[in-house]
Image (cartoon, rainbow, N blue to C red):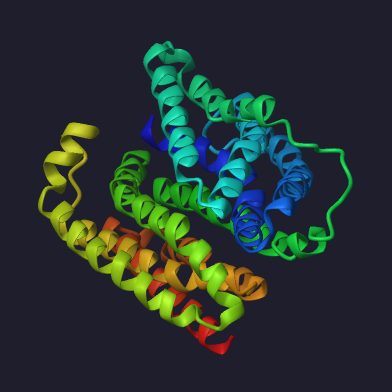
């Protein structure tokens, strides 16, 4: 169930990520730089562009699910595609507030979304758990009834600037969740679905730290990096972000490594008992992932969209390719080593791309 829900959630992330990974980040950057009178227009344009770009992806993925369902029913896959498409509205609204640094509204949206998901998980019958959780992820679209953006109003002159973020959005939004879908399937094929669930559990533990780190980078430093870009002061802000985010994350991963056995047993099952080597490698790779996000945020702020798209091939797609190359020789320890290697390469590329700019 852990692995199957992860597969379904990756479908939601794939569809929503086509808009959020590029246009969402671009919206935050442009709103931070725009005068207050133009900000609502940027939200309207981002919604039009994001929903338009993601719709054919959602439709194609739903159709493809009937050919290769990846372990779950085609109907559930189609529902996940629809939920991911609707979730774009709430995600872009969050990006809009991020550009204005309305952190209270962002916190309320995050808390409300989490409460809806928890309520859905608690109330749903076991036979419909995956479907109920999927629908819950689309709930933030209801915020549009309150905000009521003028989706069909006049187009802003900033529309062309937002279009520059479509390329990294498509690259990251499709390649990242698709690579995770493939990676779990490869681990399940070479080892078992239980081992795929164990690896997913380690990723979820890592996400406690990774999500917090990206939250600090996006909420506090992305607007600052965007504001510093016209002044050629991105480097100083990026160095500060690295110290504030990566160093504490290192300490947290060390603490999590010490207690990973009782955590896995309490949250999942006592049979989730990977070796210490596998856990250390996965956690080290996740720390390298966080470090790679600092120059990634700088690339977003400086409109380095082509570098973002090119570098994406060196992260999760590289990890999936390494798993595929290992074939039947794959172990959880080797998967952890590949996870670390992929993000070391990705971080090195992002750092080089920022220095080049």
Position of the N terminus by quadrant: top left
Q: Decide if residue 79 is on the left or right side of residue 160.
A: left
Which image quadrant for residue 240?
bottom left
Residue 306 percent across, percent down from the top left: 67, 74
| Residue positioned 69% across, 32% down in the render | 66
Q: Is residue 13 visible?
A: yes
Report the front residue among 193 and 205: 205
Q: Decide if residue 204 is on the left or right side of residue 260.
A: right
**Is 258 drawn above or below residue 76 in the view shown?**
below
Q: Is residue 338 visible?
A: no
Which image quadrant for residue 64?
top right
Position of the C terminus by quadrant: bottom right
| Residue positioned 44% across, 66% down in the render | 293
Residue that sits furthest to the bottom in the current view:
356
**Is 14 drawn above or below residue 318 in the view shown?**
above
Residue 206 percent across, percent down from the top left: 30, 52
Residue 345 percent across, percent down from the top left: 43, 77
| Residue positioned 45% across, 14% down in the render | 127
Number of labels in the image equals 0
**Is 200 drawn above or below residue 286 in the view shown?**
above
| Residue positioned 46% across, 82% down in the render | 235
Report the front residue among 231 and 108: 231
Q: Decide if residue 196 is on the left or right side of residue 181.
A: left
Report the front residue among 127 and 104: 104
Residue 194 percent across, percent down from the top left: 32, 39
Report the front residue among 332 and 199: 199
Residue that sits furthest to the right in the current view:
154
């Amino acid at each position: 169930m852990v692995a199957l829900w992860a597969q379904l959630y990756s479908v939601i992330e794939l569809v929503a990520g086509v808009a959020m990974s590029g246009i969402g980040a671009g919206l935050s950057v442009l709103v931070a730089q725009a005068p207050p009178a133009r900000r609502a227009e940027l939200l309207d344009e981002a919604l039009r562009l994001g929903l338009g770009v993601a719709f054919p992806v959602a439709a194609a993925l739903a159709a493809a699910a009937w050919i290769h369902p990846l372990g779950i029913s085609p109907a559930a896959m189609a529902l996940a595609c629809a939920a991911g498409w609707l979730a774009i509205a709430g995600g872009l609204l969050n990006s809009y507030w991020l550009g204005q640094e309305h952190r209270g509204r962002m916190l309320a949206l995050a808390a409300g979304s989490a409460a809806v998901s928890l309520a859905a998980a608690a109330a749903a019958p076991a036979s419909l758990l995956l479907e109920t959780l999927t629908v819950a992820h689309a709930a933030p679209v209801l915020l549009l009834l309150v905000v009521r953006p003028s989706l069909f109003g006049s187009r802003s002159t900033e529309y062309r600037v937002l279009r520059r973020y479509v390329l990294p959005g498509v690259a990251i939004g499709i390649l990242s969740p698709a690579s995770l879908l493939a990676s779990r399937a490869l681990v399940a094929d070479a080892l078992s679905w239980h081992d795929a669930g164990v690896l997913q559990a380690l990723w979820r533990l890592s996400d406690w730290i990774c999500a917090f780190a990206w939250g600090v980078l996006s909420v506090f430093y992305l607007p600052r990096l965007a504001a510093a870009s016209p002044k050629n002061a991105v480097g100083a802000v990026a160095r500060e972000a690295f110290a504030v985010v990566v160093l504490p994350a290192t300490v947290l991963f060390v603490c999590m490594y010490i207690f990973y056995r009782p955590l896995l047993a309490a949250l999942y099952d006592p049979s989730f008992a990977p070796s210490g080597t596998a856990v250390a490698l996965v956690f080290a790779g996740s720390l390298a992932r966080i470090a790679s996000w600092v120059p990634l945020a700088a690339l977003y702020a400086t409109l380095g969209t082509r570098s973002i798209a090119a570098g994406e091939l060196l992260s999760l797609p590289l990890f999936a390719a390494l798993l595929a190359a290992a074939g039947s020789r794959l172990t959880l320890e080797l998967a952890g080593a590949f996870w670390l290697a992929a993000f070391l390469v990705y971080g090195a590329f992002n750092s080089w791309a920022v220095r080049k700019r």
